[in-house]
Image (cartoon, helix red, strand yellow):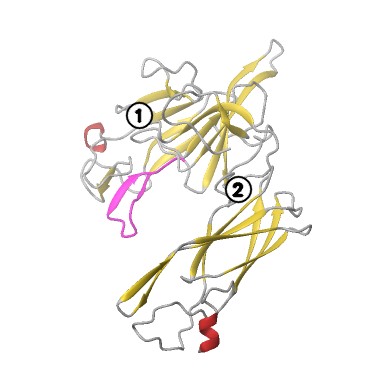
Amino acid sequence: MACLLMANCGCASERLYVKVIDDDGRPVTNAVVTVGAPPKTVFWGSNSQRNKGKSYNSQTDANGEAVVSFNCTAATFRWSVKADGCYPSNVFEERFKEFDEVVVPPAFTKVILHEHEKHGNVILYRKKNPQPMYAHSRENVVKSPIANGRYGFDLQVFDWVSPHGNGKIADFYYVRERPDETNATKRTIYDKSGFFQFRRGEPGFPNVGDVVGRIEFEEDCGAYVGKKNACENFPAVYHADPNGKYVRTYPIVITNCDKFGVWLCESPVIGEDEYMIMRSRVKRNEQGKISSVNYSKILGSFGLVYSINMKEAVFNPRPNDTNLEFDPNRNLYQGKKGRGMIP
């Protein structure tokens, strides 16, 4: 038991092995791997001691590999990776297995670990060509119209098109077609997320699978949906695909809100793990060829039932520029709320 105790009596006995590559699969040299061991209160009979949390660092070598040695006093620790010219990694949380075969007296609660090594692999996305754009986050609350109808939304101004807001050009349209306008717009006290909820089978409300709205686009415009990257600091793509399949209509349907299927609600357009690339403001020249187009991206979850709700939206104002790598330090939207932060 004495050798086990030494593992947590001040020496850096735990190790984290990390392999870091970029989005092209190349090793990232000189990336800083940081381990943060949380604080831990240790009880010794009637006395207690608060061990302060501490950070431990190591840099990757030419192969993109690093080893961080540290002392983990609480079994759980967090780590992350940063490198010049790259977007930061997520913050990962790990937990060592504790030595459950040893009976520790109640007065002595220092953690005793069963394992002392963890391994991790990280992809860092390089900063390639971040540009100034109009970016908005969900903090910028813009309520949706209540009545059934067709409403245009301007992603640059981030508002409904006149007469329902200050928008000038519609990048997409929200079409609301609820079967019973009075009942279907009623919100319940259980709704805290901006969605409309109601019990299954209530009179005047639609059923699971019913289409109650959609977003749609003008001719030559549209959108496609992709799965987010694992990196929260760069979850989508650098560029829109000019040759992608841009779909003109996305339905909004009734779906379950809970695992028991008691509460129903209107679905978001895209899920939490998805992003949407939009093509809008398409113009054609005298020969009928497309001469101008603008691209945007929206990070899910993206819904429109009560308000425009998404993690973030980015609009590139430069026609025919497919770049959607937004520079958070050069946001063209200068409002106090809703300023985007994700590239």
Q: Is residue 295 above or below residue 63?
A: above
Quadrant containing the C terminus in the rendered view: top right
Comparing 274 with 313, the one in front is: 313
**Residue indicated by mark 2:** 88
Q: Residues within 10 Å of mark 1 (few under 14, many from 20)?
A: some
In the displayed structure image, the side of residue 268 where residue 68 appears, left or right: right
Q: Which residues are magenta?
A: 254-269
| Residue at 48 percent of width and 72 percent of height | 75
Q: Identify the secondary structure beneath mark 2.
A: loop
Outermost residue toward the right in this view: 62
Q: CA distance from mark 1 to mark 2?
A: 35 Å
Circle 1/circle 2 CB separation < 8 Å: no
Outermost residue toward the front in this view: 47
Amino acid at pointer 2:
Pro
Q: Identify the secondary structure beneath mark 1.
A: loop
Q: Residues within 10 Å of mark 2 (few under 14, many from 20)?
A: many
Report the disc number at residue 144. 1
Amino acid at pointer 1:
Ser
Residue 220 placement (x, y as % from top left): 60, 25
Residue 285 placement (x, y as % from top left): 68, 13
Mark 1 or mark 2: which is in front?
2
